[in-house]
């Protein structure tokens, strides 16, 4: 979880903010070193996906899909769904509606 927390801190800050930590206590120096390690990759693009597994979905179901189709996901409201970065599980999230838009709330970093 410590590595995930570091990633969350790096993501929450802009690249410029991520490296402007004054050196002081040992934990501040460790954070500075961690931020410096992330510097080369902060601008790289990646694909963040929220995957809703449908284990009983069949080819027959796929062929029935049309615009406006509703798929019963058998997923409970509030149940965490996988959050993946470049096809690698990085945490869990849940769907919610914010200002009329479907949103994803991060609930746990893996």
Image: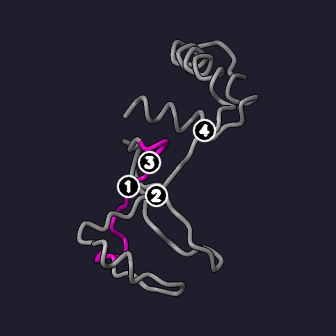
Residue under label 4, please give it.
Answer: 11
Q: Are marks 3 and 1 in contact (CB under 8 Å)?
A: yes
Q: Are marks 2 and 1 in contact (CB under 8 Å)?
A: yes
Q: Are marks 2 and 3 in contact (CB under 8 Å)?
A: yes
Q: Are marks 4 and 2 in contact (CB under 8 Å)?
A: no
Sequence-wise, the earlier of marks 1 and 4 is: 4
Sequence-wise, the earlier of marks 2 and 1 is: 2
Which residue is at the far left?
A: 56
Of residues 20 and 47, which is closer to you in this image? 47
Residue 83 part of the magenta segment:
yes
Residue under label 3, please give it.
Answer: 84
Sequence-wise, the earlier of marks 4 and 2 is: 4
Where are the magenta residues, as a range? 73-87
Return the x and y of residue 107 as percentages of the image width and height. Answer: 42, 55
Sequence-wise, the earlier of marks 2 and 3 is: 2
Quarter of the figure with the C terminus: top left
For the point 38% across and 75% down, the residue is 62
Sequence-wise, the earlier of marks 3 and 4 is: 4
């Amino acid at each position: 979880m410590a590595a995930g927390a570091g990633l969350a801190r790096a993501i929450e800050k802009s690249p410029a903010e991520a490296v402007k930590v004054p050196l002081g206590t040992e934990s501040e120096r460790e954070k500075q070193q961690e931020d410096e390690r992330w510097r080369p990759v902060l601008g790289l693009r990646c694909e963040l996906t929220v995957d809703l597994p449908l284990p009983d979905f069949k080819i027959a179901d796929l062929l029935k899909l049309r615009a406006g189709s509703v798929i019963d996901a058998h997923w409970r409201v509030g149940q965490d769904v996988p959050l993946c970065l470049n096809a690698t599980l990085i945490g869990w999230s849940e769907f919610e509606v914010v200002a009329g838009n479907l949103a994803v709330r991060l609930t746990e970093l893996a």
